[in-house]
Amino acid sequence: MGIDKQSDIAANIQIGPTDQGMVRIYIEAEGGIELPLDFDPDEAEEIAEELRAAAEAARTIGSPAPKKPGRR
């Protein structure tokens, strides 16, 4: 499966600070899978920038082309 392929796997995600000054992305998926991912604050900001860029790219892919004005 590639990053651009849809999946039927359901998961929950939580994001927050840890008591050690890290940012944790915690993923819990079907089948009892738990995946805590800890990042330092700079890495977390880089991930946030990548998420914003991916969201913007997804908007351009998912939106219809603007209509061109035409003659009636």
Image (cartoon, rainbow, N blue to C red):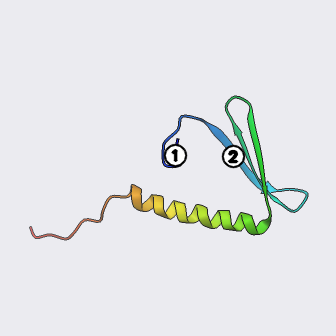
Mark 2 residue element: strand
> For the view shown, which residue lies furthest in the left direction?
72
Q: Residue 26: image x %, image y %?
A: 75, 47
Residue 9 is drawn in which quadrant? top right
Circle 1 is placed at which residue position?
Answer: 2
Report the mark closest to the observer, 2 or 1. Answer: 1
The amino acid type found where label 1 is placed reads Gly
| 69 left or right, relative to 19 | left
**Residue pictured at 48% horizontal, 44% vertical:** 5
How dense is the environment of label 2, judged by Cα within 10 Å: few (below 14), some, or many (20 and up)?
Answer: few
Give the mark nearer the N terminus: 2 vs 1.
Answer: 1
Vertical comparison of 72 with 12: above or below? below
How dense is the environment of label 1, judged by Cα within 10 Å: few (below 14), some, or many (20 and up)?
Answer: few
Q: Which mark is residue 40?
A: none
Q: Residue 24: image x %, image y %?
A: 78, 54
Vertical comparison of 49 with 62: above or below? below
| 5 left or right, relative to 72 | right
Depth check: give the residue in front, 2 or 25.
Answer: 2
> For the view shown, which residue lies furthest in the top direction?
31
**Residue pictured at 19% horizontal, 71% vertical:** 69
| 72 left or right, relative to 45 | left
Depth check: give the residue in front, 60 or 33.
Answer: 33
Q: Residue 13 carries which label?
A: 2
The number of callouts visible is: 2
Mark 1 residue element: loop
For the residues bearing labels 2 and 1, Cβ distance under 8 angstroms:
no
Depth check: give the residue in front, 39 or 65.
Answer: 39
**Residue pictured at 78% horizontal, 66% vertical:** 41
| 19 left or right, relative to 50 | right
